[in-house]
Amino acid sequence: MRRSIAYPLAAVGAMLSTLAVAPTPAQAHGYVSFPPSRQALCAQGKVANCGPIQFEPQSVEGPKGLKSCNAGLAPFSVLNDDSRAWPATSVGTSVTFSWVLTARHRTTTWQYFIGDRMVAQFDDGNTIPQATVTHRVDLSGFSGRQKLLAVWNIGDTPMAFYSCVDLQIGGGAAPAPQQPAPAPTSRPSTPPPAAPAPAPTTAAPARPGGTAWAPRQNYRVDDVVAYEGRSYRCRQAHMSLESWEPTVTPALWLAL
Amino acid sequence: MTFPRRVTLAAAALLLLAGCGAGPAASADGDPAATAPAAAYNDADVMFLQMMINHHGQGVEMAQLAEQRGSRQEVKLLAAAVVTTQTDEIGTMKSWLQEWGEPTDVDRAPSAHAAHGGLPATGETELAALKTATGRQFEQQFLNLFVGHQHNAIEMARAEATDGASPQAKELATRIERSRAGQIQQMLGLISG
């Protein structure tokens, strides 16, 4: 019961901020997460220097009927730049696309284009989509590297959301597994030789035990790290993130 | 962006403000003589904390499912860390609201959400979808849902960073924005992995 209002409230929050001057990005929306769209690759950090799209891959919204990767939005023009060497995902001729949605709008259709040709269309009849959306699209007739444009046509506004997906078609049935984040078993990076506890930018580490805490490391229970002059013991295995520093995550790190 | 329901929502937002953003003056059910320090905060802070507590609770439920039913170790570890950190943050956020003499639960403004009739009740649908999925399909569904969920958290946090007044709440919002961006990054990698 409580749950049921979370999203409407999120929407209200977004609106509130709009009322109050805030240049907050538009609320909501969605993009293709697999095979990864260009904005997903930017958000994931696999393609660098993408600009603001990195932080809001869900916001590629424009009028219906466009054929561009950026919905005509200048700040997202990197998405149109074919010279960026976007990694293409290897797929067979039948591909299942999945979407991340941050708000579920009434939907007329989902369309998939290669060049000017519409290769698939799914008609939702102006209903609200499921919580997760996937479509199986037949791409037989295509091979090699292709740029596919996926479009989510909203039912109750004139707008649509656009995602370009780079594919390498015909390499076999299964997408080539890409290297996921570091292997879960790996220890936090071995201490750099010699260097006595490289100080995390801020001043003043006394000589705390353990290697310096860093983001994107797999820490295991009882690993000891140094952060801002103190030592911490890992209480729960996790991959560290920026802003999960030991000072602010007492649930993950016990100060020693 | 140009959604016609904006007007309705704006109205709903005002209602909600009226309903639960009692403001710094005096709490409805406590001694107005304020035991808590006269912290500087505004309605946006109160809204943010109440909404975030709710949003976090929903996230914890989803992550708990993933902790049990995920197949990859990385997914399970991430889910477990989310459960731990978000539960912790819920406690912190509740304590601030209590200090301010504000309700911690958005449900205490029932009239406010009656106005949301046009919007889908996403939370329950999401959980229902997750509960029926299994194996690798479960993981993909969880990851896609949770990425969307954390995008929402970032949107709420950004609004707070702009509109809030309480330094501690704004600092939490900044932290939420950054850590959720990190989680999204990791999860998008897992979706492709």
Image (cartoon, coloured by chain):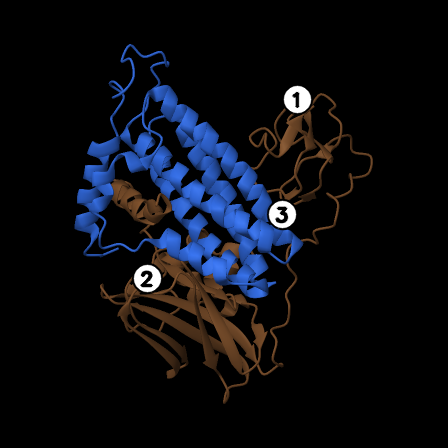
In space, the residues marked 3 and 2 are separated at their CA atoms by 34 Å
Q: Is residue A114 above or below residue A34?
A: below
The residue tagged 1 is A204
**Residue B14 at x, y percent in the picture:** 19, 38
Q: Are marks 1 and 2 in contact (CB under 8 Å)?
A: no
Quarter of the image with the N terminus of chain A is top left
Amino acid at dot 3: Leu
In space, the residues marked 1 and 3 are separated at their CA atoms by 32 Å
Identify the secondary structure beneath mark 2: strand
Are the residues flagged by discs 1 and 3 from a single subunit?
A: no
Amino acid at dot 1: Ala
The residue tagged 3 is B77
Which residue sits furthest right? Answer: A194
Foreground label between 1 and 3: 3
In the figure, the shade used to draw chain A is brown
Quadrant in the picture for residue B49: top left
